[in-house]
Image (cartoon, rainbow, N blue to C red):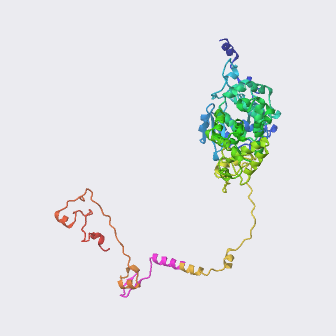
């Protein structure tokens, strides 16, 4: 009760007590290298449309951080004052996702997505203080707020920078711009409270420290080591996505070494042991991950399943030495089943891991023999990933015999990964069909136009359209003018040209004669004048000899009306019934001949 009374006199706590720059520190374009032309044009379209509707909008997060560091951003995120429902009404090509906090995906041509979120409010325990035995894990966070509150509730200072494309300025509420210049990684607010709100922030802190080569702040490192057991509360599906992101960076070894230094590795992967950074460097798992990263830089393609197999290989060390002879499939399943369930690995990838480990003894048999067919084994869908695991394991152990066996299996046509969905590569790769062959019709498709356009992040060229200038025409080479009449005279005449022209003229004249109305009168042998060939008297003998064409017979059809009510609408008398007439002139019952043909149809026109 006393606390409530004191809160009434003190007023409601605000984010000004948490952030160092409550009014926002403006860093104008004279003091940084970020320009509007370097940003994604689709993200700028989203910001411009939201601004036209009266909603304040900025670029936020990793795109601003990477641009300040001089790196190419992977994507561009937009934060705005509008709520998800308001964003949906503005953009027809959008959808709402998220359970804990709803965000909107604006979809452009080619499947490109711009993520738009709303300014979030600061949690109450950040302002009022933590109570005893209070669970701070955020399960639902749909409370909207102001830009300063949204910056105060983010994870790190380097991820809380806003970029305003209107005047090309950076808005800093938490001092993230200075931390980027000093290459320091600092948590916003109390690190222990922040890690209890979202345990994945500890994992991301270790990842950013290794990926960006930043120095982790002492208070943040102390909070990670104290709250590392909170990682068990994190969602397994979300952690699996974080693992996949690490595998695609090409610096998996450095990030896992950072996890070992912070003490998170023993919590996330207990089967790897409790080791620090230097011990992990010389451990079998560390050597395998280091070799895998080097293979990626040598234009070799890996998959996420290969990295998972490199980690889970600690559970089945006997299969690489030939220690298990019987029922190897059951042995592998029993060893990796519990960890696959804990890591939430899908069933398809779990089956692929089993195939990879079961096939390892097969690489020790290179000679052809009874039941040994290398060409058939090389055609298996899991061969590429199994071979990479065998090769990396042989190189990590320094086993010369195993390396020689790997060279035998590597000889021959180059084999590619079976699927592009789990592919990890550091270089652009051509599209391939399901057999691994390059696609001959590999052209930029509609779904890749948006990505390829922004891949190199080159500045947009101004051809004078926006400034009102006229675009200069492209110079064309001068060609000498030629007289078409002279060219026609110089051409050799075709021998059949005159013949074709005569035939065309003859057909044209015939059509004209048939269509003209003022034809000259002609007389027949009897002296009668005739104006048309059809008016001449018909002579069967002339037709037989071919002197006169046969007369065209014109058949006239009359519309026959059927009876309205079955009897033609009239009374049928006995006399008419005998003659086959219904008594109704409009009926269809007309007298017929002996052959059954109607008189009207058999009559000569």
Residue sticking out furthest to the front:
370
**Image mark count:** 0
Residue 75 or 278: which is nearer the viewer? 278
In percent of width and height, residue 510 lies at 48, 78
* Region of the chain picked out in magenta, as a range: 504-532
- Where residue 277 sits, quadrant-wise, is top right
- 267, 360: nearer the viewer: 360
- Magenta stretch containing residue 377, yes or no? no
Image position of 579 with respect to 462: above or below: below
- Residue 402 at x, y percent in the picture: 76, 45
Between 582 and 157, the one nearer to me in the picture:
157
Picture quadrant of residue 595: bottom left
**Image position of 545 (left or right of 456):** left
Relative vertical location of residue 480 with respect to residue 197 in this rendering, above or below: below
* Residue 545 in the image, given as x and y percentages of width and height: 39, 85
Q: Residue at x 75, y 65 (%)?
A: 477
Q: In the rendered view, would you say 489 is above or below 89?
A: below
Q: Is the C terminus in the top left, top right, bottom left or bottom right quadrant?
A: bottom left
Residue at 38% x, 78% y: name it: 551
Can the viewer see residue 8?
yes
- Residue furthest out toward the right: 182
Q: Which quadrant does the N terminus fall into? A: top right
Where residue 309 appears, as percent x and y from the top left, is: 70, 40
Task: Reply yes or no: does residue 526 show up in magenta.
Answer: yes
Residue extending farthest to the left is 574
């Amino acid at each position: 009760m006393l606390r409530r009374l004191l809160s009434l006199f003190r007023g409601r706590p605000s984010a000004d007590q948490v952030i160092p720059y409550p009014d926002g520190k403006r860093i104008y374009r004279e003091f940084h290298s970020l320009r509007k032309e370097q940003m994604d044009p689709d993200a700028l379209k989203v910001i411009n449309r939201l601004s036209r509707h009266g909603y304040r909008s900025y670029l936020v997060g990793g795109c601003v951080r990477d641009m300040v560091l001089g790196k190419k951003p992977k994507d561009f995120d937009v934060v705005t004052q509008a709520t998800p429902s308001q964003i949906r009404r503005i953009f027809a090509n959008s959808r709402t996702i998220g359970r804990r906090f709803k965000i909107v995906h604006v979809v452009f041509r080619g499947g490109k997505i711009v993520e738009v979120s709303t300014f979030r409010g600061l949690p109450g325990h950040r302002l009022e203080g933590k109570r005893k035995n209070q669970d701070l894990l955020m399960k639902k966070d749909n409370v909207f707020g102001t830009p300063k509150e949204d910056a105060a509730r983010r994870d790190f200072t380097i991820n809380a920078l806003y970029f305003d494309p209107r005047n090309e300025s950076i808005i800093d509420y938490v001092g993230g711009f200075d931390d980027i210049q000093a290459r320091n990684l600092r948590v916003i607010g109390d690190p222990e409270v922040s890690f209890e709100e979202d345990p994945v922030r500890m994992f991301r802190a270790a990842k950013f420290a290794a990926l960006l080569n930043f120095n982790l702040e002492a208070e943040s490192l102390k909070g990670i080591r104290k709250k590392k057991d909170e990682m068990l509360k994190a969602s397994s599906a979300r952690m699996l996505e974080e693992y996949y992101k690490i595998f695609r960076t090409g610096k998996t070894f450095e990030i896992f070494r950072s996890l070992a230094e912070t003490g998170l590795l023993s919590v996330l992967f207990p089967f790897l042991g409790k080791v620090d950074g230097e011990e992990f460097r010389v451990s079998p798992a560390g050597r395998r991950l280091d070799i895998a990263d080097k293979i990626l830089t040598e234009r070799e393609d890996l998959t996420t399943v290969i990295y998972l197999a490199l980690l889970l290989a600690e559970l089945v060390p006997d299969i690489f030495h030939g220690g298990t002879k019987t029922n190897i499939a059951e042995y592998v399943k029993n060893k990796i089943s519990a960890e696959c369930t804990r890591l939430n690995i899908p069933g398809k990838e779990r089956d692929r891991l089993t195939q990879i480990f079961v096939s390892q003894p097969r690489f020790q048999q290179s000679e052809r023999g009874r039941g040994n067919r290398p060409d058939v084994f090389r055609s298996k869908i899991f061969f590429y990933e199994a071979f990479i695991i065998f090769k990396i394991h042989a190189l990590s152990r320094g086993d010369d015999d195993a390396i020689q066996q790997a060279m035998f299996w590597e000889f021959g046509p180059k084999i590619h990964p079976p699927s592009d969905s789990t592919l990890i590569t550091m270089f652009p790769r051509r599209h391939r069909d399901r057999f691994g062959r390059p696609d001959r019709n590999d052209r930029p498709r509609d779904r890749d136009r948006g990505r390829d356009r922004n891949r190199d992040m080159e500045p947009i060229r101004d051809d004078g359209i926006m400034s009102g200038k006229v675009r200069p025409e492209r110079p064309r080479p001068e060609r000498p003018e030629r007289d078409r009449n002279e060219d026609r005279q110089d051409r050799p005449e075709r021998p059949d040209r005159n013949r074709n022209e005569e035939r065309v003229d003859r057909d044209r004249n015939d059509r004209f004669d048939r269509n003209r109305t003022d034809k000259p009168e002609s007389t027949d042998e009897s002296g009668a004048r005739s104006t048309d060939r059809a008016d001449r008297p018909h002579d069967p003998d002339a037709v037989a000899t071919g002197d006169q064409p046969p007369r065209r017979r014109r058949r006239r059809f009359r519309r026959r009306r059927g009876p309205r009510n079955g009897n033609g609408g009239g009374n049928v008398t006995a006399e008419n019934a005998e003659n086959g007439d219904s008594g109704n002139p409009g009926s269809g019952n007309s007298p017929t001949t002996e052959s059954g043909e109607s008189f009207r149809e058999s009559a000569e026109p």
